Structure formats: structure tokens, C-alpha cells
Image (cartoon, helix red, strand yellow):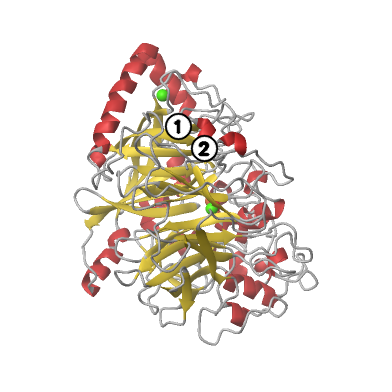
Amino acid sequence: MSVEPRRFLPLLTSHRTGRSAVTCEYRCGNACAHPAPNQSDNEYFGDVVKNVVSRRGALKASAVLTASAAGFAALSGTATAAPPPHAGKPGRPGKPGKPVPGTDFDAVAPNTADAVVIPDGYEQNVVIRWGDAVLPGAPKFDFHRQTASAQAKQFGYNNDFVGLIPQDPLNWRNLLVVNHEYTTETDMFPADQYDPENPTEEQVRIAIAAHGLSVVQAVRDPRGGLRVVPSRYNRRITGETEFEVRGPAAGSDYLKTSADPTGRKVLGTQNNCAGGVTPWGTVLSGEENFNQYFANASSVTDPVVAKRLSRYGLSGGATTRKWERYDDRWDVAKEPNEVNRFGWVVEIDPNDPHSKPVKHTALGRFKHEAANIKITKDGRVAVYSGDDERFDYIYKFVSKGRYKKGKSAHARRHNMALLDEGTLYVARFEGNSPAEEIDGTGTLPSDGEFDGTGKWIPLASGNESYVDGFTAEEVYIFTRLAADTVGATKMDRPEDIEPNPVNGRIYAALTNNSDRGAAGKPGADEVNPRNGNRNGHILEWEEKRGDAAATTFEWRLLLVCGDPATADTYFGGFPKDQVSPISCPDNVAFDRHGNLWISTDGNALGANDGLFSVPVDGPNRGQVKQFLTVPVGAETCGPVVTDDLVLVAVQHPGEGAGAAEPESHWPDGGKANPRPAIVSVWRKGRFHSGRIGIR
Ligand code: FEO
Ligand code: CA
Ligand code: CA
């Protein structure tokens, strides 16, 4: 069957709309409760549209659209691989066609179950959960007797990104790389042990050890699914593991601290969110809401330093977790440069458990989401990354050197240096519809699409800055401030960004932005077309000539998310009574057919978060179908979709209720406290018994 019609999927009314207050506190330091850090007078897109449209008029605008739509379709034919047989013009669906390979399953209805709910005919298992053994000697997890030394050998908390790297052609053995974005101490410690006002030093050390990443070897179980095995590859990277700082800002005075006068050695990685697997088999991971770990920004009096801190969301005194009580490096009044050592893309080589992880300064410093790579036409690598904050920007890095194919040690060394030097760009979007047609309600303009063109504005290249008033090292370390000055477009919280390996276009999730159009804030524009955007949208673009090195592109919105029964939503032109409701898109992935898979964070429609598939070409473009839902209070992260396996990270199940009376008991059941975990889903039956989304 195709998707269940919307009328049979009534939305649930729940007390939980969007994230819980506790999620906001621990995950992003209550970002939405504070003013958006981008207070720059950087011209916003509404002004750009007014200028463009006043020059060419409405009639001309529609002529531009026709040309651009034709160009878009033509460009999509120049993609890196042949389009699938069902491919058609994006955004021009005809009648719904037969189910697209990879998406032929019975959609899961919205629900508030304390379970991972999957389609009929599929099975699931928990691959690994918080506290499970990663390293030899890890003690059995005991919720009531946690220690820092145990946690440093166990799977960390709040799994987010998932990378699956096959080690053989049958995907029998794989390296599973997972990051642990943040800790929620009021859920992870028994209530009678944890006083949020007075955490013990051991509890702080446990939390630091629960951050970072885990690498484990995972084998296919003959009964289906993935199973973690003891292996020499298994590794924990924590908030105290040593990283090497590389690229043009390595050794900068802004990165020197009393513990590291070289500015090249950082202990730990924090708040790792969306990431990516490189073509050379390493994992990139974005450090996101690092600001919340640093105390006492309010005591900084130097106006230049205070402005830099404020632009990165640092304000106030004590932090929620109070790590600053036990180590000065978390206190900006005592160790002012430590904060500049976070907010980077980090690279981990899971193939070598003894390799030193790297922080890449050439990719800029902001609240990084994702680092996914597309090879340019001349063999260099382009890395796409979003800055997840209301009214922040989308970035691209293009390397100077070229990618070397092959798995030799020489090729690996060469490729692992590619991100050391290149050009960092920020995106500017322009629409092609008259400004008066973009009224903030989400109503489509008369040309039928939210779409237009864009350009990549260079910020710095190697040691050369293109931004007035900024040295190159300042561009890399204070990237947000540099981007403010060049006319970058303020977006609705850019999350994951990923190139489609089949059609060559790039897809970005814009999660939401409740401040869009609020008093004194930027209003709707064609690329962020709804004021008070609670449900988010999905953006796609095609680089000129399909080349990731291009500095111009054409874009359009694939989805304007929310309740399909309301007028402010858009599903790529697909009939809205035949799609699943979707809210707050966050992480994205592709299957081998080129279908987009979207996981959500903070469903504002009252149901649990989920994982959705959507074809992006042909007559079924925009046919959103819910593949699974995660337990109450949880967020769906890190989707990986292979031919016969789907992996998701279930992050913060039951978050917000506290450890004394947990709202979720997943995955252990009974009266157990919830534990973040990785789940694999496969077609009912044995290993390789069936393909995902193919009947
Ligand atoms: Fe960690 Fe932007 O979600
Ligand atoms: Ca338009
Ligand atoms: Ca996320």
C-alpha cells in the first residue's frame, strides 16, 4: 500500500509540544530562552528580495523562475551518478506513481508509545545502550553505582550521530562510530544521589567521561540486526581525550591556555552533534552547543572579548553542570581562551584505535552540525556544515588538495590532511518571487514554489582573509562575526546537511525558528518562508554544473513541514492527504535509491519523534512516510539506511521527568530508568532476508 491517508492519522494532543524544559536546559543551555546570538545588522533576506524584485518586477520574476527551473532540471542531469529510472523534474510531480523502491512499507501512525514502533514485517534490536561495555574490563552497568573510571570504558550518554563503516564487502563486520552529545544529570543519576546545585567531583568526572564518542565493532547477527563484539578497534573518546589542533588557526594566540601554551593540544570534544563519514573512512563530528559548558562570561569586561562571547551564546555566571567548580578551564574569567578550543569539526580515524583525533580549524568555528563531503569535479573535497542557532548560517569548505582513492596508508595520510587547507564560504540565498507574496504564512507564491538562486561568499583561504577587519585566524576562530559582515542569509536553525549520492543535489534540514518574524527580528523570506516557524523545512540545492566547487547554486524548498491538513505546509507538490505529518527535521541520510530519510527532534505536533522516508525525484517526490517512532520524550538521531538495515540513535528517552519517576522505561522495561541506545531494524527473518522498503 502507499501511505495511509492523513485523515486516518489524527494528530495527538499531548502535554509535550516540542522539547521538554529539561532537554532545553541540558542540551543547548536553554538557547531558545535567550536572545538569538545573531544581533548583527546583516541585511536579512527580506530586504534582499525587495531589492531584487523592485528591479525586475513580477512578470520578469516568473520568467526568471522558468529559466531557473529548466536550468535546475538540466543541472540535475549532470549529477555524480545516473538518476534512477523513476527520476523526474524536481518539484514537478505528476500523479502519485507506484511505490518508490526503498519507501514501500506501511507507514507508522503518529503515537506516544514508550517504544520504538516500526512497520509491520520488520524486526528490531538494541545494538548498544548507555553503560554497555566498550572496552575490556568495563564493569557491568549499575545505575546506582556509577564511577568515572567505569564510564570511560562504557558507552556514553545521549548518542546522536551514527556512522557505519563496512569492513568487508558483505557488511558482515562493521565499525560503528557514535557520538555522545550531552549529559542530562537529573536523568542519569539517581535522584537521591544528585543535587543539581552541588554536584560531586566524581559526578562531574562521570559526566565528562559520558561525552565524546564511542567506536565499536558490530557484526551482523545471523538472526538479523547488528551485535557489538569485543574488538581491538573498540575505543572511547571522552571529554578528556587529547586532540591535535590542525589547519591555519592551529597555534594561534587565541587558542593558547595555561595548560597548553602551544595552542595545538586540546583535551576533549563536547556536544558533538551531526557528523559525516569521509570517503577515506574516517568520521567527522561537529561540536555544537559548547557554550553551555563555560561559566562566568558575564564577568568579562573587555568589550571585544564580551562581544565574541555573546555572539557564541555565552552569557551569565555559573553553568547548569557546574564543572567550573572543579577545573578552571570551564571558567572564562580564569581561562579565557579555553572556549575558543571548542566549536570545531573533529576527525576520528576509527580504523586506528591509537590515532590522535584532530580538530580542524580550516572549517571555521561555530555550533557545527554535520560535515558531509562531496567530491568536486576536479577531485577536491567540499564539506557542508550548518550552524544550528536561530538566524545563523550555512557554510561550505572546499579543500586545496585533491582526494586520493584507495585505502593505502599513503592515501589515508594524504586524505586526512585535505581538511588542513582550503577556502571557507558562507551561503547567501535570494528568492525569485515578489516580496509581497512571501507573507510569512507559508502560502506558496504564485510561481508555485519557494525557490531561487544563491551564492557562496568566500571568508578566508589558507592564511588569506577576505573579510574586512578580520585576520585569517580571526575568520576561522570567530567565524560567526566574520560571516555577519558579508551578507550571509540568516536561516531557521541549519541542522544536518548532506549531498544526495544519486541525484547530486544537497539537502539541509532547517529545524524551526519560533523567533522568525517576532518583534525586532528578521521576518519571513523565501528560503525561510514562515513566521514563528515551529515545524521547520527541508531545503535542496544544486551547485552550478553539479560541481561542489561552484560558487553559485539554485535552490528550492522540498518540504515545508507540519500538519499536512494545515495550509502552511508543502510536501514537494505531493497530495497532502497521502503523507505522514512531520515536524522539526533534524538529521538526514540517503538510501542507495536516492530517497531522503529524515529524523526529527522536538515534534511540535504532539506525537513522538520519528524517522521518515521521502522520494526526491519523479512523481512521488514529497511523499513523506513515517518509518518508525522513538519512545516518549526521545529524539531520533543518526539515521543510517543500508539495503537491509536501518539504524537510529534514540537520544534522551523520557527526558524531563527526572530519575525518581521516569516517564520512560525504554529500553530495559519494567521500572528501569531509561537509557539512550542505538537500535537496528531489519526485514523480518534472517540476515539478508529482505530489503528495506522493497516488497
Ligand atoms: Fe544537536 Fe542541532 O541538534
Ligand atoms: Ca518562487
Ligand atoms: Ca540534533
The residue labelled by disc 2 is 579
- Residue 337 appears anywhere in the view: no
Looking at marks 2 and 1 on the same chain, the residue that comes earlier in the sequence is marked by 1
x and y, in percent, of residue 34 in the image:
66, 44
Callout 2: SS = loop
Task: Give the amino acid at mark 2.
Answer: Val
Based on the displayed image, in which of its 4 quarters is residue 420 positioned?
bottom left
Queried on whether the Cβ of the residue with tag 2 lies below 8 angstroms from ligand 2, the answer reads no
Find the residue positioned furthest to the bottom.
137
Residues under numbered marks 2 and 1 in contact, where contact means CB atoms less than 8 Å apart: yes
Mark number displayed over residue 368: none
Q: Residue at x 51, y 37 (%)?
A: 579
Work out whether residue 477 or residue 94 is closer to the camera in this orientation and state it.
94
Q: Residue at x 31, y 54 (%)?
A: 463
Q: Is residue 437 left or right of residue 463?
A: right
Residue 592's place in the image compared with 670, above or below, is above
Mark number displayed over residue 574: 1
x and y, in percent, of residue 15 in the image:
74, 45
Rate crowding at label 2 as few (under 14), some (14 to 19) or many (20 or more) other CA atoms within 10 Å: many
Q: Is residue 353 left or right of residue 114?
A: left
Rate crowding at label 1 as few (under 14), some (14 to 19) or many (20 or more) other CA atoms within 10 Å: many
Find the residue positioned furthest to the left.
378
x and y, in percent, of residue 559 in the image:
47, 36
Q: Is residue 81 left or right of residue 680?
A: left
